[in-house]
Amino acid sequence: MGKGVKAAVIGGVFAVMVGGAGYGAYNVIGALNGDGGAGGAPAGKRTGPPGKDEVKETTATFFAAWQTGAAATAASYTNNDAAAERLLTAFGDDAHITGVKITPGAAQGTTVPYTVKATVSYDGKSKPLTYRSKLKVVRGLTTGRALVDWQPSVVHPGLKKDDTLVTEQSATPPIEAVGRDGSVLTKEKYPSLGPVLDALRDKYGEKAGGTPGIELVVRHDGDGAPDTPLLTLAEGEPGKLTTTISPNAQAAAEKAVKRFAQSSVVAVKPSTGEVLAVANNRTDGFNAAFEGQAAPGSTMKIITAAMLIDNGVTSMNGPAPCPDTAVWQSQTFKNLTNMKPDENATLAGSFMRSCNTAFIKLIDEKPLTDASLTQEAEERFGLGQDNWKTGIVSFDGRVPAVDGPDRAAGAIGQGQVQMSPLNMASVTATAITGTFRQPYLVSPELDGREPARARGLRASTAAQLKQMMRLTATQGTAMQAMAGLGGDIGAKTGSAEVDGNAKSNSWFTGFRNDIAAAAMTEEGGHGGDAAGPIVAAVLRTGG
């Protein structure tokens, strides 16, 4: 099936178009069919939620038509018959699914669960397919008929808007991804790695030397993401692909992110740039650990502190007063609630307490300009130049040169500054070693990728940053999260307000010996409350 076809298809369940838009689509076509009448609703039409008998009758007729491959008839019992007919037709033509049998479960109000059993056949190969899904019966706005609310998940629970189901010879051969110790990495053992393994296969399947098989896949036409395999009819020969993942660190990361919704974590090896773990706990399958773009809050103060030191504004033991408030171009910035002011604070003291006002007051000092933070991020930490080649898609961070209130906000990780956990893990690695080593998941030698380069930090600057992070982990805002970790440890906490969200995002980055990690969660709270325990759990493995 060509990628232009936005239909779904599998086992009887494919769907498209989300419910709200479907009502209007049905009403127009229903009117043409004489169901609604061009002049308005028919006399005596029903109103209110569909009753028990209507739910049963509608689903029964819809399932019966679907099972026999009568796409147009089945579609006429939905609130988006144009989209439904297109997808249900493609269900048989492109996904090659036949012998469909649908068994409904007990209705819960207007929601009906069901089990689909069918056969997928292609090029002389066949396999049974079984899955569960559910649909909702709604009232047509114009006709008053009880109709199936048409959504992609009606066809298969793994389908989203613009997804399709296709059975064909694999676009790329399968891979056997292995960790740094040679053990096999699978999405069954490491569920969070699923999107990463799919991305690796999409990019390196042919280079790894395997041969393609025959699969039923979800094709994500809307966002260009790699296909998601659902059923293998004929095994291909996998090619072996060695990654930098540490099974121990990955297992800890998988477990840690489960503690908080919408959480992501990355761990890297500072001495090499190798990615040791990448995990996400998200409902949308998005690899936010690598591709997320969010304000990093006070973890950004690592870069801001480096800028202040490199430009001679102050030093670790130099002055960085921490007043209650700081005004920058008519905007007032404050500290966390209950933070006591300290006009005699040093940079180390304000860093470990995460005093916002100290950093705001210092960014107006000469020779700093609107571009100074951008230059520090790009030239010293390798950020924001869109040239990282990690092995899969990743975001390189963004620290734009701005004036006005956003210049001050950027210094404390707000405003227009955006980072991913991968970026912040790299920032910590650069801060403690003084050398920028672009993170990577697959060795550049496999495909001749040229890693991104940056100047890195002066030895004295790196030494001061590392010591300030040590103090933060043992005496400052990260102390509770890092408690119990032995070895050489350091950290920085952060929280970032996001427009429209009731809770702030929680950020945390830290190191232990030769492992650096960073996490972000939308669970809320200060960095040490949510993201901190995630990072600490990964650091505890030692890589």
Image: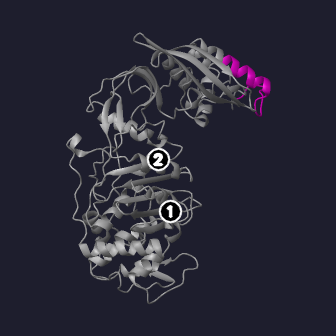
Position of residue 199 relative to residue 467, above or below, is: above
Outermost residue to the bottom:
344
**Magenta span covers which residues?**
38-62
The residue singled out by tag 1 in the image is 532
Q: In which quarter of the image is the C terminus?
A: bottom left
Quarter of the figure with residue 222: top left
Q: In which quarter of the image is the N terminus?
A: top left
Residue 28 or 391: which is nearer the viewer? 391
Quarter of the figure with residue 167: top left
Q: Can residue 227 be seen in the rendering of this structure?
A: yes
Q: Residue at x 42, y 32 (%)?
A: 221
Q: In this view, does 262 lie to the left or right of 30?
A: left
Residue 529 or 240: which is nearer the viewer? 240
Q: Where is residue 115 in the image (x, y as percent from the top left)?
A: 63, 23
Q: Is residue 298 left or right of residue 382?
A: right
Local SS, label 1: helix
The residue singled out by tag 2 in the image is 251
Q: Where is residue 76 in the image (x, y as percent from the top left)?
A: 62, 20
Residue 339 or 501: which is nearer the viewer? 339
